[in-house]
Amino acid sequence: MSQLHLGEIIIDVEQKNIKNIVVHEMVHLLVRKHNAVFRAYMNEYLPKWRCCKDELNR
Ligand SMILES: [Zn+2]
């Protein structure tokens, strides 16, 4: 279902951003794309989230 996100999960795991991954995937249950709504949710649930490679890759 979310195979497209396996790559970014692996990348994040390597960087030990476990919490970031979990929140990220939870938000994806609500918003499938990395759009403004997605970022708004991330800012709400994880204010300190850092998503750079993710944004650059899409
Ligand atoms: Zn994602």
Image (cartoon, rainbow, N blue to C red):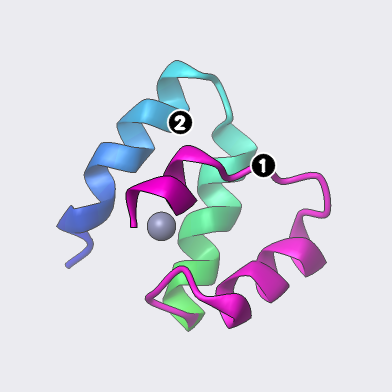
Determine the secondary structure under disc 1: loop
Image side of residue 41 versus residue 6, left or right: right
Q: Which residue is mark 1?
A: 50
Determine the secondary structure under disc 2: helix
In which quadrant will I find the N terminus?
bottom left
Q: Residue at x 51, y 44 (%)?
A: 21
Question: In the rendered view, would you say 55 is above or below 8?
Answer: below
Q: Which residue is mark 2?
A: 12
Question: In the rendered view, would you say 24 is above or below 56?
Answer: below
**Who comes first in sequence, dot 1 or dot 2?**
2
Q: Is mark 2 within 8 Å of ligand 1?
A: no
Q: Residues within 10 Å of mark 2 (few under 14, many from 20)?
A: some
Q: Residue at x 81, y 45 (%)?
A: 48
Question: In the rendered view, would you say 49 is above or below 24?
Answer: above
Q: How many marks?
A: 2
Task: Report x, y in % for residue 12.
Answer: 45, 31
* Quarter of the view holding residue 38: bottom right
- Specify the amino acid type for callout 1: Arg
Q: Residue at x 47, y 52 (%)?
A: 55
- Front-most of residues 6 and 57: 57
For the residues marked 1 and 2, what is the alpha-carbon distance in whole angstroms?
11 Å
Q: Is residue 24 magenta?
A: no
Report the disc number at residue 26: none
Q: Residues within 10 Å of mark 1 (few under 14, many from 20)?
A: few
Q: Is mark 1 within 8 Å of ligand 1?
A: no
- Specify the amino acid type for callout 2: Asp
Task: Report x, y in % for residue 9.
Answer: 36, 39
**Image depth: mark 1 or mark 2 in front:** 1
